[in-house]
Amino acid sequence: MGKNIYVTSPLMPPLEEFVPYLEKIWQNKNLTNGGSFHQQLEAELARYLGVKHVCLFANGTLALLTALQALRVTGEVITTPYSFVATSHTLLWNGLTPVFADIDPHTFNINPDRVEELITPNTTAIMPVHCYGIPCDVDRIQKIADIYGLKVIYDAAHAFGVKKEGTSILNHGDLSVLSFHATKVFNTFEGGAIICHNERTKQRIDYLKNFGFAGETTVVAAGINGKMNEVQAAFGLLQLQHIAGAFDKRVALDARYRELLQGVAGVSVLDVPDDIDWNHAYFPVRIGPDYPLSRDAIYELLKQNGIMSRRYFYPLISSFPMYRGLPSAAKGLLPQANLVADEILCLPIYPDLEFEEQQKIVDIIQSPLTVQPPLFEKVS
């Protein structure tokens, strides 16, 4: 039996290249609290990403929690139900009320038209998600925010390195939050970052992620322990040296998927606008009504063959117990999000995925189209 193939696999540079970093940490005895590798990674990421300031965190969820604190967000926050649960969980942890807006059926991002309809006197912010790394309609969202005086915090967990018209998508909104989890295109094992646009905001964020300390004996805010340690930062520095080659491989895998899946009845791929420099973080396909199997059935068929695809995002955040009682979580108000959640399937894509393995995945997807019923019956 062959190895299992997963949706993502972390970029792992050669071990011998990591050893010198570990030796330096061992010699310096500086393990955390903004050490030299931490400072270096912040600077190099800011330069690589084309942003002004990077504030590193131990993980992306802590970064989201702190971003909301940094902007002193209160009341209601309009967000998407089509995301990982951390997006909305950070709102609850901050005592905020999530208000779910339906998504665009083509990009799967929050629909600005729905956002504007949901604004009330209690609304103070919008938290959109750049789903699969495809940018939201940032211009429309910013226009709405400006009209109503709202903050904009982008959950940019998927959007590392993404550009629109040659400019980093992370420069939009008041803050953007990245995830450096092991499954992301750039990772530090666990990790994350807040992208901000001025030194004053960075200083506040840096206070908040270190318990609120503004000196040895001065505490200026009710902060949290969100600091990235030196081992994580060192791994990030090494990752940056290999990221260009990893992106090249992702581009090739994406192109090959599109070629192999072209013309497969009932299977459609995500269209990426021409002005977007995409990071190919995921490869989502929609399993439509013309395909012989339901999305869940082809998911199980792939799984039986050692292919661990992912129904990402399913179920919707709005369907979980802590959210489904919210008025905005009603299924009838989120038709597009519910439809996409039932049809989407993310196929494996990562730098070490071999073309032979990719061909196997596509062959399994095509197999129900060539087998006569009743071996494969449509499963609802």
Image: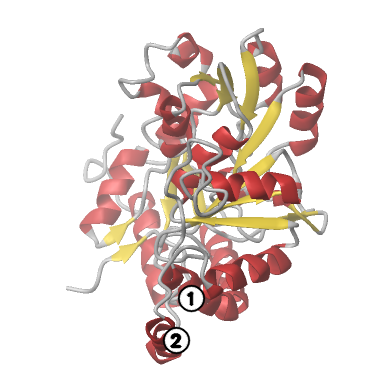
Residue 338: in sight, yes or no?
yes
Q: Is residue 49 above or below residue 287?
A: below
Quadrant location of residue 249?
bottom right
Provide the residue designation for mark 2: 24
Does residue 309 appear to the left or right of 275 in the view shown? left
SS state under label 1: helix
Q: Quadrant of the C terminus?
A: top left
In the picture, the disc for residue 234 is 1
Coloring scheme used: secondary structure
Q: In the rendered image, which quarter is residue 232 located in? A: bottom left
Taking the image as shown, residue 331 lies to the left or right of residue 131, namely left
Name the residue: 79% across, 53% down.
275
Determine contact: label 2, label 1, CB under 8 Å.
Answer: yes
Residue at 56 percent of width and 33 percent of height: 68
Image quadrant where residue 136 sits: top right
Q: Amino acid at mark 2?
A: Lys
Q: Position of residue 159 (x, y in %)?
A: 61, 53
Q: Position of residue 146 (x, y in %)?
A: 81, 25
